[in-house]
Image (cartoon, helix red, strand yellow):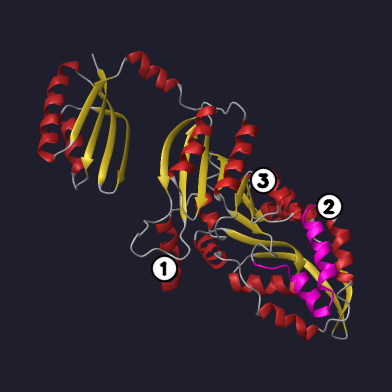
């Protein structure tokens, strides 16, 4: 008759440790039912759930494991597992799973505790915790440090909406971002990322910069803010603002593109995603002359925006063709996904304004980036504590892989 045992090995890590202990189990033809390992600051915690085919071998295995553990300075704990408890554990597989990602400049025990408390209140179990960012030097601290921790949880939340609301409250109080997404096959197989442009890929609203050139900055700024808060229909507000730009000379437009401030992390995010095989697009309510520039600079595959009407080298105050608003952005996302033969669940949409909500809401992963309050409240995922490269952590990419992709791109 077989026995099921749980083996826990803890202590200072060293090369060959796994080979040594699994080798002992192999001598007794043991079957591995589950295995997990974590190493923190050179200390290992190795867990093995094993089936011993012949229960008579239990004492011999126990003795051999303890002996080897003593020689290596490790603590060995072996406990029998009741058959009923084991079967209960087997039947529990298939539960809903979610990924909770914490982003910030630093991650504190208080923040982890607050998040873990909400998870516990919703009767969810934390199955694993992974650090996605690199190790932090205390002697040579970075000017703009990044910290990201990913938690994998299982179970069905008691109140999903309340859970998200509490995460938002913690985010606002602690200055961190907490993203919450379903863990399924699509999460690991995203293929298309679309970005808003103004205040997302670049750190400004181009229409505001044009307004300064035209001497109508204050008037346009008020309309822009109202539109981004969702108080005015985007198309109407856009027409009002563009009308105020009448008279700007065409040569002045190129001056703006040369001085556009890219958002922190935009280059790194675009380069890493491209190297990983993602298709990238810009879906913007801004202007084509800027979108084309960014598409070439960042190596994007698609760009949709608005064309300023120019006659005799002067802006007329009108737009050519249909205006790209929120509804149009969601349509374009569907069209691109269909063209690339990609399911919507495999898409990611990133934006900051109310007119980005339609595409954010239908994408597999919708992200509010440095977003206005109305957008952040409605989006399940948000980034505001770091640059656009924070998106890479939401996808689950470890910092060492980000650096690897950038290094390879530099070499080739």
**Label 3: few (<14), some (14–19) or many (≥20) C-alpha neighbours in 10 Å:** some
Given this view, does label 1 or label 2 mark the residue nearer the observer? 2
User: Picture quarter containing residue 377?
Assistant: top right
Q: Which of 51 and 309 is in front in this view?
A: 309
> Residue visible at 86% across and 54% down?
233
Which element type, helix, strand or loop, lies under badge 2? loop
Q: Nearer the viewer, residue 132 or 82?
A: 132
Residue 167 picture location, percent across and down: 58, 40
Given this view, does label 3 or label 1 mark the residue nearer the observer? 3
For this view, does 75 lie left or right of residue 154?
Answer: left
Give the vertical position of 243 relative to 173 (above or below): below
The prevailing secondary structure element of the residues shown in magenta is: helix
Looking at the image, is mark 1 or mark 2 earlier in the sequence? 2
The residue that label 1 is drawn on is: 407
**Rounded to the nearest whole Å, what is the CA distance between mark 2 and mark 3?**
18 Å
Give the vertical position of 298 relative to 214 (above or below): above
Residue 156 forms part of the magenta stretch:
no
- Residue range of the region highlighted in magenta in the rendering: 202-230
> Residue visible at 20% across and 27% down?
29
Tell me the number on the disc at residue 106. Answer: none
Which element type, helix, strand or loop, lies under badge 1? helix
Quadrant (top left, top right, bottom left, bottom right) of the N terminus: top left
**Label 2: few (<14), some (14–19) or many (≥20) C-alpha neighbours in 10 Å:** few
Q: Is residue 398 visible?
A: yes
For this view, does 56 lie left or right of residue 363?
Answer: left
Q: Is residue 322 visible?
A: no
The residue that label 3 is drawn on is: 379
Given this view, does label 2 or label 3 mark the residue nearer the observer? 2
Looking at the image, is mark 3 or mark 1 earlier in the sequence? 3
Give the vertical position of 350 relative to 71 (above or below): below
Tell me the number on the disc at residue 231. Answer: 2
Residue 92 picture location, percent across and down: 46, 23
């Amino acid at each position: 008759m077989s026995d099921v045992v749980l083996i826990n090995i803890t202590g200072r890590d060293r090369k060959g440790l796994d080979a040594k202990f699994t080798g002992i189990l192999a001598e007794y033809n043991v079957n591995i039912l589950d295995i997990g390992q974590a190493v923190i600051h050179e200390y290992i915690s190795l867990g093995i759930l094993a089936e011993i085919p012949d229960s008579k071998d239990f004492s011999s295995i126990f003795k051999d494991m303890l002996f080897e553990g003593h020689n290596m300075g490790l603590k060995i704990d072996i406990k029998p597992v009741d058959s009923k408890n084991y079967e209960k554990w087997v039947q529990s597989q298939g539960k809903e799973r979610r990924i909770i990602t914490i982003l910030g400049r630093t991650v504190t025990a208080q923040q982890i505790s607050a998040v873990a408390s909400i998870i516990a209140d919703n009767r969810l179990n934390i199955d694993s915790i992974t650090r996605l960012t690199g190790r932090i030097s205390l002697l040579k601290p970075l000017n703009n440090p990044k910290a990201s921790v990913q938690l994998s949880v299982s179970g069905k939340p008691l109140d999903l909406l309340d859970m998200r609301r509490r995460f938002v409250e913690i985010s606002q109080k602690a200055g961190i971002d907490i993203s919450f997404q379903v863990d399924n096959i699509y999460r690991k197989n995203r293929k298309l990322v679309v970005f808003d442009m103004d205040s997302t890929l670049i750190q400004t609203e181009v229409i505001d910069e044009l307004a300064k050139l035209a001497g109508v900055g204050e008037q346009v700024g008020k309309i822009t803010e109202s539109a981004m808060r969702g108080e005015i229909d985007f198309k109407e507000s856009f027409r009002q603002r563009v009308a105020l730009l009448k008279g700007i000379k065409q040569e002045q437009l190129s001056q703006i593109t040369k001085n556009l401030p890219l958002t922190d992390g935009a280059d790194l995010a675009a380069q890493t995603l491209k190297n990983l095989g993602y298709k990238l697009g810009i879906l913007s309510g801004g202007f084509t002359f800027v979108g084309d520039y960014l598409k070439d600079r960042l190596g994007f595959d698609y760009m949709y925006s608005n064309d300023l009407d120019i006659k005799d080298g002067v802006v007329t105050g009108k737009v050519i063709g249909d205006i790209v608003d929120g509804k149009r952005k969601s349509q374009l996302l569907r069209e691109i996904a269909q063209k690339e033969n990609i399911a919507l669940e495999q898409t990611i949409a990133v934006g900051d304004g109310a007119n980005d909500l339609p595409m954010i809401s239908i994408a597999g992963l919708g992200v509010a980036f440095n977003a206005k309050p109305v957008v952040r409240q409605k989006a399940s995922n948000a980034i505001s504590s770091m640059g656009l490269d924070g998106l890479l952590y939401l996808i689950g990419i470890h910092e060492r892989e980000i650096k690897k992709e950038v290094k390879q791109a530099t070499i080739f």
